[in-house]
Amino acid sequence: IPALIVAAAIAVTVVLSVWYLVRPEPLLLQGEADATRTDIAARVDGRIAALAVARGDRVEAGARLLAIDNPELLARLAQAKADKAVADAELARIDAGTRAEEIAVRKAAVDSANAALVLAQQTYQRTKGLANSGNSPLQRLDETTAQLEVANRTADQARLAYQEAVAGYTKEDRQIAVANVAKAEAAVATLQALVDQMVVAAPAPGQVYRIDTEPGEVVEPGVPLLSLIDARDIWFRFE
């Protein structure tokens, strides 16, 4: 009986050992899951005004992620819009031509200058006669001569100004005004594009994976602020 007990124990041990060695084991692999990730950065500098999402949120394309505050950029945009308004007004003024009131003012200036010229000529002739007869000093003749020259130049300037007003603006004047309007429009478009980037939106559907900023933090262009992953494009890597 002891021998049978020992033999049975040995047999059980052998059977269990063989089963333990040949039993099927599941294949265990270590690895990690990964997905397409998009790091999102701002194109403008400023201070984070608000975060519209939290980690783990699912967002659609175009969804608002965060907002940046930049008062200086908004002021530059307002200045650019004001400059464009001035350029538009200048072009409209050139297209409208010289106003009739301005032409009348220039015509009145010509009449006044001509009247002053006539008076200067008469004074000169009278003084010249008196000087030749010895009844007026030569200094007085020199003064009236200078006054006549000034009156001539004033009349010429008034006449040229009147002719310019009647002729209106030149083609070159309008080309310059058109160029100034185009320049102002380009400045507004450039600044408006930057202002639009103050609201950072999701470029594609995804899930918020990581947020690297907080409200009130100052950010710079090109620095990643948060990351999105595409939950529809996940793969596993095993070692």
Image (spheres, helix red, strand yellow):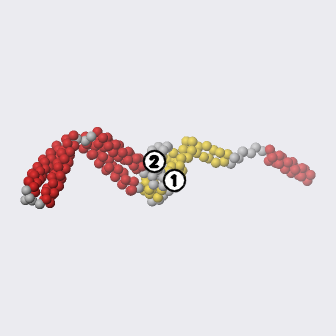
| Residue contact between numbered discs 2 and 1, judged by CB atoms under 8 Å | no
**90 or 131: nearer the viewer:** 131
**92 or 217: nearer the viewer:** 92
Percent x, y of residue 25: 74, 45
Percent x, y of residue 148: 15, 52
**104 or 205: nearer the viewer:** 104
Amino acid type shown at disc 2: Ala
Q: Residue at x 61, y 43 (%)?
A: 235
- Few, some or many C-alpha atoms within 10 Å of disc 2 (few <14, some 14-19, many ≥20)? some
Quadrant location of residue 96?
A: top left
In space, the residues marked 2 and 1 are separated at their CA atoms by 15 Å
Residue 201, numbered circle: 2
Percent x, y of residue 170: 27, 40
Question: Which circle's residue, 2 or 1, is located before the other in the chain?
Answer: 2
Q: Is residue 100 visible?
A: yes
Seen as rendered, the residue at the extreme front is: 133
Q: Residue at x 62, y 47 (%)?
A: 33
- Few, some or many C-alpha atoms within 10 Å of disc 1 (few <14, some 14-19, many ≥20)? some
Amino acid type shown at disc 1: Val
**Is 101 situated left or right of 67 in this image?**
left
Quadrant location of residue 132?
A: bottom left
Residue at label 1?
223
The residue tagged with tag 2: helix, strand or loop? strand
